[in-house]
Amino acid sequence: MNPWRATHAHLRAVVAGFGLLVAGLVLGRVDVVLLAAPLVLVAIAGQAARPDEVPVGRATEGALTVHESEEFGWRTVVTGMPPGGTLAAFHPGQRWLDVEPEDGRLVAAPDGTATTDIALRATRWGRRRLGGPVVTAYDAWGAWRWTPDPFPGLQVTVLPATEPVDSSAPAPHPHGLVGMERAGRPGEGTEFAKVRAFEPGDRLRRIHWPTSARTGRLHVTATYADQDAHVVVLVDAVNDVGDSEGIDGVHSSMDVTVRAAAVLADHFLRRGDRVGMRVFGAWGVSFVPSSSGRMQLRRLLDTMSLIEPGTARGEDALAARQALGAGTLALMLSPLIEPASTRQVAMLTSAGIDVVVIDTLPQELAEGVGPGTTEQEALAWRLRMLQRRLERDQMASLGIPVVTWTGPHSLDQVLRDLTRRSAVPRLGRR
Amino acid sequence: MSTTSGLSFRDRQGHRIGTLSVANVLAWLAIVAPVIVAAEVIRVAAPTSPWWPAVVLVLLAVAAADLPDSMFPLSTVLGAAGWWIAVVEDVRLGPTVVVALALLVFHVAAGHAALGPPGRDDDRAVLRGVVARLAQVGALTVVLAAVAGAATGRVDVPPVALGLALLATGALPWLAGRWKRSAAGH
């Protein structure tokens, strides 16, 4: 059976053209026959152009991974088109997806093959299946159409955007064997510490000849060890406050949290540190063990893209401590809406873990009327914001740094302060 | 990446209601303007005709521009032709050709608009093809009208003869196509 179907245009040309022709003949009016003439010609040409061959369509399908704001494409290639035929392709838009051209594309098939490219751009992190695109082929006269079975939509994993951080602040408590951090103790490294007398075991290439010649005794150049830091990013995904319009528009608290986590993970991994992640409040993702390198960044970003906020509530506050030892730098990213996050911070601090709380509630929500629509909701939001301010002040009075995330440089001063503080001996409850 | 090629109208949820672009306006005009021209020609050719059929025709054309893949374009063509048949008595060649070409342009423009969603991005090659086919059919119509006009008064051209000539003219490319396909098949 021929899969090509007549279009409304062809039916119109046939009905109006031949109808008028018959009317002109019956009435004996040449003018009516002349009115019918172009439509009859188009109808006959359309009928003559009816295609027999069934086209074959192929389109981009499967799964792909992109970063937020990164462009990718959807391509269709249809072969076996009739001569002079056209192909209409349309990719449906959806939330957090830009499509260009938004209304589809109509392309010619000069040699029987039509190719359409539609540009797509994901504007928010996450994993989603895109809507099914549609194509329709027409013959040269637009009299016949062929529509293939719908193509499956693409499965897209959108990783949160990372931007480079130009931060020179060191991380406190460096550990391990490799990394870019200057350790607190002397050892093999590149950072100059002092010139001291030679001791058995010192490498000969460390001998400082000018001092040795002046004093008559061998001296060596001592360095600080190059070591890495253990950083754990704690993501509070219990609530997603506010509306999200993607990377170019208004950000929700979860947007700010995930993008900040991505930036921080990228920053510390670039420095050679070990970074792990713990997510609270999202079902299916909870913990990524610490490691270093580019693969770890990809692992972390993949995990972040799977976060579905608010799908796992009521987790034990002690869970935050698992796999964290003293000396770990914990970066707690939270909108500080849920009181449980404050309890977790207190628990981590009492365990001797350096915690930096990064407030990810968008500024317009913290200062505005909140996400509610009624007067009562606005009042409730205002009360919660007052409590939240009190909790922030209490944390600050306990020496826990609380930073509002305003970009990659928000942490610089805090990390410097922590490094200075970590050089001072102190007691911690284990 | 720009997501629209014109002025986009959206509701409060961000869903697009419509796009206003130069291409959209031209496509709309290509559908509505021929009907306005045809209505004006009919009104001039039949001055005693009532005014309301013109309004109905234009409204039908506007509806056809919004829904080109529907019965509105057929209704518009039949409405215009019916009005012509009903009111035009003093038939002249010029107005007839103008109305015939206007209906052709309307039909082709509506057919082209129906090839996909409104506001889509059209290749220039597609537009060139549409214009070329429009020009071919328009030229054939003018030739037929010229033959009919030249014969009027000299020989008595019965409409049947003109109809048969028209069918023969249209059948030629069809026969040629069939012959070409059967030759390719063998």
Image (tube, grey):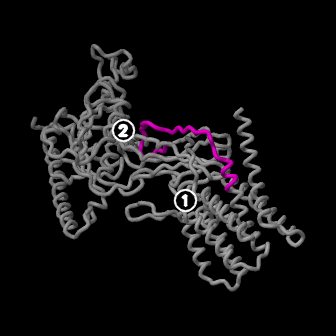
Give the vertical position of B39 relative to A34 (above or below). Answer: below
Give the labeled residue for mark 1.
B69
Give the labeled residue for mark 2.
A266
In the rendered structure, the answer to whether residue A416 lies left or right of residue A4 reads left
> Which of the image's four quarters has the C terminus of chain A?
top left
In the rendered structure, the answer to whether residue A132 lies left or right of residue A173 reads right
Based on the picture, tell me whether residue A70 belongs to the magenta stretch.
yes
Based on the picture, tell me whether residue A365 belongs to the magenta stretch.
no
Q: Which residue is found at the position 20% from the left and 34% from the top?
A: A327
Give the image quarter of residue A125.
Answer: top left
Which one is nearer the viewer's eye here, A284 or A161? A284
Q: Which residue is found at the position 36% from the left and 42% from the top?
A: A127
| Tag count | 2
In space, the residues marked 1 and 2 are separated at their CA atoms by 52 Å
Q: Residues within 10 Å of mark 2 (few under 14, many from 20)?
A: many
Q: Position of residue A140 (x, y in %)?
A: 66, 49
Residue reaching furthest top? Answer: A200
Question: In this picture, which residue range is highlighted in magenta?
Answer: A43-72
Residue reaching furthest front? Answer: A26
Read off the chain for label 2.
Answer: A
